[in-house]
Image: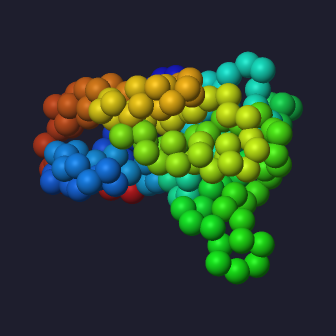
Amino acid sequence: MTERERLVQLLVERSVRTGDFVLASGARSSYYVDCRTTTTHAEGLYLVGRLGFAALPEPHPDVIGGLTMGADPVACAIAHASWIAGRPVHAFSVRKEPKAHGTGRRIEGSFRPGQRVVVVEDVITSGGSALRACEAVWTEGGEIVGVLALVDREEGGREAIEAAGYPVRTLFGISELLRASERSSTSVPPQTPETPQSHA
């Protein structure tokens, strides 16, 4: 099994849920992707970092980050992988609102004006969260060279971001994860005392 195949497996097992959900965009959906249950899992964090680092555009950006909190573990995972690879790319986080005390910053972490930036996102739906992060980075003087997302829900968000002038790369489309989920559900044997299943 490749690292990519294993990350698909983890996302299906830990992050893809079916039911009736209201998304951040306000739309309703029959499924929900909570990437944080994978990006904060030790193995998931490692794989997101490895695959995310490999997906960064060349030449590499100076820093990566996005809107808290979904983007935070993605950015930190990639930053860690970049250090291990000997090509460090540092991380930052964009607050949803500026701090009302202290420095009043909206961007926290290893970001400085003039740096080349890739904005990261865990899930793209409408593209609104990534565009808010892009606006904050641009306002603070960053040079945005692209957007990288773990999962694209394939609902027009990628196109909205690209229409704003930012190239987009994604590791997975939701159609791939849903197909993998269907295959997984049909291949699981009935649970009996002889075939125990782990729910870790």
The spot of residue 27 in percent (x, y) is: 23, 49
Asked if residue 38 can be seen in this view, the reply is: no
The spot of residue 133 in percent (x, y) is: 57, 48
Q: Nearer the viewer, residue 173 or 68?
A: 68
Q: Residue furthest top?
A: 58
The spot of residue 90 in percent (x, y) is: 78, 44
Q: For residue 154, which quarter of the picture?
A: top left
Query: In the image, is 89 to the left or to the right of 195?
Result: right
- The quarter of the rendered structure image containing the C terminus is bottom left
Q: Residue at x 34, y 46 (%)?
A: 33
Q: Residue at x 66, y 62 (%)?
A: 106
Q: Nearer the viewer, residue 43 or 63?
A: 63
Q: Nearer the viewer, residue 13 or 132?
A: 132
Query: In the image, is 160 to the left or to the right of 46?
Result: left
Q: Residue at x 67, y 43 (%)?
A: 138
Q: For residue 52, which quarter of the picture?
A: top right
Q: Residue furthest front?
A: 139
The spot of residue 77 in percent (x, y) is: 65, 45
